[in-house]
Amino acid sequence: MKLAYIGTYPPRECGIGTFTMNLYRSMAKNNGINKDSIDGFIIAMNDHDQTYDYPEEVKLTIRQEHQRDYLSAVKFINLSGADLCILEHEFGIFGGQDGVYILPLLHRLEIPLIVTIHTIIKSPSYNQKAILVEICRMANKIIVMSHKAIEFLTTIYKVEREKIVFVDHGVPNIQINKIQSKEEFNLENKKVLLTFGFIGRNKGIETVIKALPKVVEKYPDILYMILGKTHPNVLRYSGEEYRNYLQHLVKSLNLKNYVFFLNEYINQKELFKYLSAADIYITPYTNEAQITSGTLSYAIGVGAAVVSTPYWHAAELLADGRGKLFDFNDSNGLSTILIELLDNPDELKNLREKAYEYGKKITWPRTGEKYIEVAKKILEGKPKVLIKKEIIIDPLILPPFSLAHIKRLTDDTGIIQHANFGIPNLKEGYCLDDNARALLMVLMAYRQKKNTLALDLSPIYLSYINYMQNKDGTFRNFLSFSRNFLDEVGSEDSFGRTIWALGYLLDNAPNDAYYQTGKSVFFNASPNFEKLQSVRGIANTIVGISYYLMSNPSDDSILERLRSLSYKLIKHYEENCTADWKWFEPFLAYDNGMLPFALLHSAERIKDSKITEIALETMNFLTEITLKDGYFSAIGNEKWYKKGGERSMFAQQPVDALAMVLMYHQAFHLTKDKEYLTKLFSCFMWFLGENDLRMNLFDFETKGCCDGFESYGVNRNQGAESSLAYLISHLTVLLAFEEFEKID
């Protein structure tokens, strides 16, 4: 059995790294329950731009904040011959917001996955919960080190209980004589209290220091040893502020002779010597939110008398008389317990014996055996590599259609452009683009679902469009919340989107008043059609004209304008097209699917073979680039994708997914080829987690849609553009399903 491990690894100074090393060694050397040898290698996580002199078992490293390293690593694993992957998960060791960069790696993994979860948050943020839920979904088995962790996973994160396996945190099988350890450190005449691990504010060391004066008064031979370096993240952002505070506290309480700081990261053997030399080991953490503590497990493993605050892991591990608990930040309570234990050597001895007996059950060889058992059961079940089947449109997968967030963003002027998370950001005011999209969406919603709220909202958006039109038929775009114009003439993109919405209105008007208003604005704008130069402004206008012609097919003047604009778009294509670049520009930018989408609409109206040919050719070119892995990967707006260059992965935006959904729907409508419905649904599922980060953009609580993927993860703001893109896509999927049902 060959295993791939992903985690931090020594010599990087990290508790997870020590865990990964011990797990690797305990499984590789453990042949007691497995006839075959167990081989493996490590993929080590590097923090920031640090490099380390790793041992030979480390075959590859991932730089924490370098997204492409994760993709290189998964390719290496898939080609390595490994049978199974074991991931050590801790939010802080992976890149992106809350460690989101690990998701693309796990999604591309072609072998079974075991995940050891080191931290489970009781009240996670949206991102933290979404990431951990996705990791658990992809895992074949999840290993946790406390029963509290099982409770949290099943109740908060809704993980199936059958997936979860409890395995104690392993401890080294090292036996060290207590008397010899005391002699080695010249502590024979001292009663030693010990705390070890990375130093940071949440460790609560000040609670012990404040408890010492009462203890010293009765036991002047006491010595409190604080063993460990300041946590690297604390050091990076706060320096030695906390350690300096502790040292000042020691001085102010006249405890200089009773407290010793050892600012080192020591190896396991040295650590166990200090643990053996200690009379009492203390973990004074300041709150309950610690689901696993390796330092506590080590103390129990060596048979130490442990006193601790009742954080989750401690309350569980120290049950049944294996240790003593005191309240958080309770120095008086701690001093009382310490004095009582020092007064009663027999009770101290009893604590040590119970801890030692339990510690013998959780040595690393035993932990390794349990991991091997889990791995064997997975592999014996012959798990198949997930082969993606042809996607069909399944409307049951879609969340319930809701206009709740759109209503929240809309006032009597129009739809607010931006939002802070799910709350309208009034400071940014309104724009024509979004009100045009909003009009299109509510008209679709009323046509397909007879949604009365959609009908109520439609005159607001139409009124905004009317208000923003200039005398020459052009449109302003931006309006402040105080209803002041912020520009004279808007972009050609906003012009085209408005014509698209108006054209759809003229083909689907819910009543004559709306039709007449839309017709007036549409034809006032029409003299500007020929002036358009922007390819997206042209494309959006083509779509609007095409919708108008659906109910007015005999309008030869508008039909000729459609032909003229279509060939203007084709001219851009001919100027930029090469054998390996079938596109309208020398780069792929934003809203790319709109360009083939427009020509597909034009082809339906004009019946021109050249228009159809170029529409399909450019659509196929775009498909090869963005759907090559079986799911939609939008061109990132961070750098775009220049011909001959590298494509940008971030920032991916919902309008790009919308354009692809619309493009494939029109392709199906034109050709009746069901393969386009498969692609359509793949692009829609981008909103619901079938994307590069494997994360939902649709917010099931607010009913809005997040603004996209940035380099740090999901942009949680839910502005009008993104939410409307989702809703139009949702309605298009439903419409495509109805059309499919009719012909199938």
Image (cartoon, grey):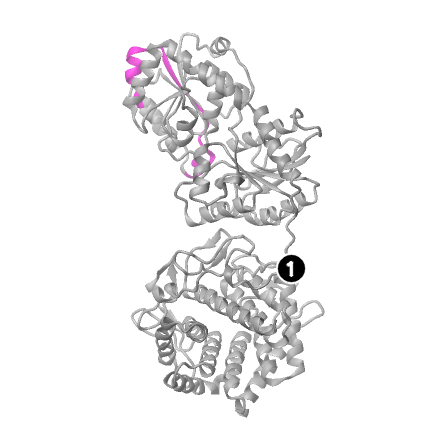
Q: Residue at x 51, y 76 (%)?
A: 540
The residue that label 1 is drawn on is 628
Q: Residue at x 42, y 11 (%)?
A: 349
Q: Horizontal and vertical percent for residue 73?
A: 63, 44
Q: Residue at x 53, y 82 (%)?
A: 546
Q: Horizontal and vertical percent for residue 196?
A: 44, 24
Which three-letter amino acid code belongs to the residue tagged 1?
A: Lys
Q: How many marks?
A: 1
Q: Quadrant of the N terminus?
A: top right
Q: Horizontal and vertical percent for residue 487?
A: 38, 74
> Dot 1: few (<14), some (14–19), or many (≥20) neighbours within 10 Å?
few
Query: Can the viewer see residue 294 in this picture?
Result: yes
In the rendered structure, does residue 216 fall within the stretch colored magenta? yes
Please identify the quarter of the rendering in which residue 246 is found. top left
- Callout 1 secondary element: loop
* Magenta span: 210-237
In the rendered structure, does residue 538 fall within the stretch colored magenta? no
Query: Can the viewer see residue 252 in this picture?
Result: no
Q: Quadrant of the C terminus?
A: bottom right
Q: Horizontal and vertical percent for residue 252?
A: 29, 23
- In the displayed structure, would residue 712 be above or below residue 379? below
Q: Residue at x 44, y 8 (%)?
A: 188
- In the displayed structure, would residue 76 be above or below residue 644? above
